[in-house]
Image: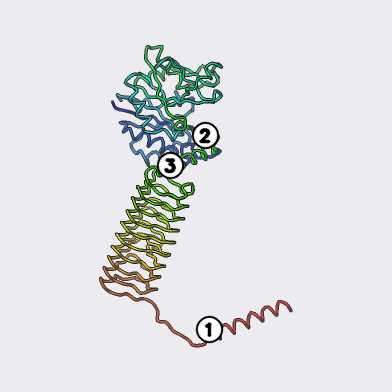
Amino acid sequence: MSLALILLAAGKGTRMESDLPKVLHRLAQAPLLWHALRAGQALEPARSVVVAGHGAAEVEASAAEVAPEAQVVIQEEQLGTAHAVAQAKSALAGFEGDALVLYGDTPFITVETLEAMRDARAGHDVVVLGFDVADPDARYGRLVTEGDELLRIVEFKDTTEEERAIPLCNSGVVIADAATLMSLVDAVGNDNASGEYYLTDIVEIARARGLSAGVVRCEEAETLGINSRAELRAAEAAFQARKREELLDDGVLMSAPETVFFAWDSYIGRDAEIEPNVVFGPGVTVESGALIRSFSHLEGCHVSRGAIVGPFARLRRGAELAEEVHVGNFVEVKNSYLAEGVKANHLTYLGDADVGERTNVGAGTITCNYDGFFKHRTTIGREAFIGSATMLVAPVTVGDGAMTGSGTVVTEAIPAGALALARTKQVTKPGLATKMRDMLRARKAAQKSAKEG
């Protein structure tokens, strides 16, 4: 059965106290929108529709980064969830299959839960995602059931005391045949105190038409919606705690996991070791057996088996470290490939570079990759030795087995096996340092005497 995804992302998020659309606030270094989209995209939908409103242009641009095939439609006025779903009608014209409604501010729903909802469609025309709560005062709509059938959804403000005692609550997530869903949404009215069109009404409308409705249950934590900065902070803490536990269970070694922070898509292999106080930005893969030492920051990079990074290292977007590479303290790597066995252990910047196998890069080396207008690339061969404080002025090439003397400024290609020295000759003036100190000391004393006088 084909599937269409309808993602509701039109809300302004007034309680966020921000000009940024609510769904673009970041959780685990990615917009909330991306989390919901990723869960939905895992089901391989034939069509994806994002319903935007406040900040629609920004929402559309963000959605395109992770789901370029998604179509964005605009909800000019926010008149309720059923009204929002109705905006997707034209985008789903001619579509045959199920439609799944998700929310851009609900980032934790799992793929497994969505698959269970899709499977449950075999027994019901409409399937709603529910969860159990222990608190009768929890301000969620209640799902009134009879056996396997969902009879109706009651908004919390409309519940009786008996209905509030029902632990099964509404998440808002719904799946149904797309044509059926749109027909039900068209029948929803707004005769209520808020004057809004509520998606919850479709259950009673469906049953009045002789259709069946059912419930799939999930953990309450999956349905967490984010409406304020306090809730976003709590969600961040929940994400990090969950990710740490997941990685520990997968065999990643962390001595102080509470000090390590991950992005939404961090991948860490089994038997990798992460020391305290490490931050992972988006797009990082660390293979099995790698060691990431304390106070390092990684983003958009790939670290291969047996590599060592840090402490105090920074890997930026496009850094590719092959097996057994060592990148040490205060080393920054950007858009560069370091082949197997490369060592750059101290105080070095490697940007826009290719470094061959088993090359050693001395302390203080810099690839001078930017001329003020364009970036240029440095290529260093295998088993080369780059002396400390070498400046490699790109574009430039260093051949296999070549060497540079400390303090060399390289502006021309160095052939394989050659030694390059490019620095001024040292001149030593005996006794001159003592004379200068005496002169400066006397000058300073005279200035102090003048001030006191």
Disc 3 packing (10 Å; few <14; some 14–19; many ≥20): few
In the rendered structure, which amino acid carries the disc numbered 3?
A: Glu
Camera-side residue of 373 and 142: 142
Residue that mark 2 sits on: 227
Q: Can you tell which mark lies on residue 245? A: 3
> Closer to the N terminus: mark 2 or mark 3?
2
Give the label, 3 or 1, closer to the camera: 3
> Closer to the N terminus: mark 3 or mark 1?
3
> Closer to the N terminus: mark 2 or mark 1?
2
In the rendered structure, which amino acid carries the disc numbered 2?
A: Asn
State the residue at coordinates (37%, 43%): 250
Left or right relative to 339: residue 196 = right
Q: Position of residue 26 (x, y in %)?
A: 47, 42
| Residue 309 position (above or below residue 285) | below
In the rendered structure, which amino acid carries the disc numbered 1?
A: Ala
Q: Secondary structure at mark 1?
A: helix
Camera-side residue of 175 and 248: 248
Residue that mark 1 sits on: 433
Quarter of the figure that contains the C terminus: bottom right
Camera-side residue of 269 and 39: 269
Give the label, 2 or 3, closer to the camera: 3
Assess whether mark 1 and mark 3 are in contact (beta carbons under 8 angstroms): no
Query: How far apart, in angstroms, are the residues tagged by discs 2 and 1?
Result: 67 Å
Query: How far apart, in angstroms, are the residues tagged by discs 3 and 1?
Result: 61 Å
Q: Position of residue 50 (x, y in %)?
A: 40, 32
Q: Secondary structure at mark 3?
A: helix
Q: Secondary structure at mark 2?
A: loop
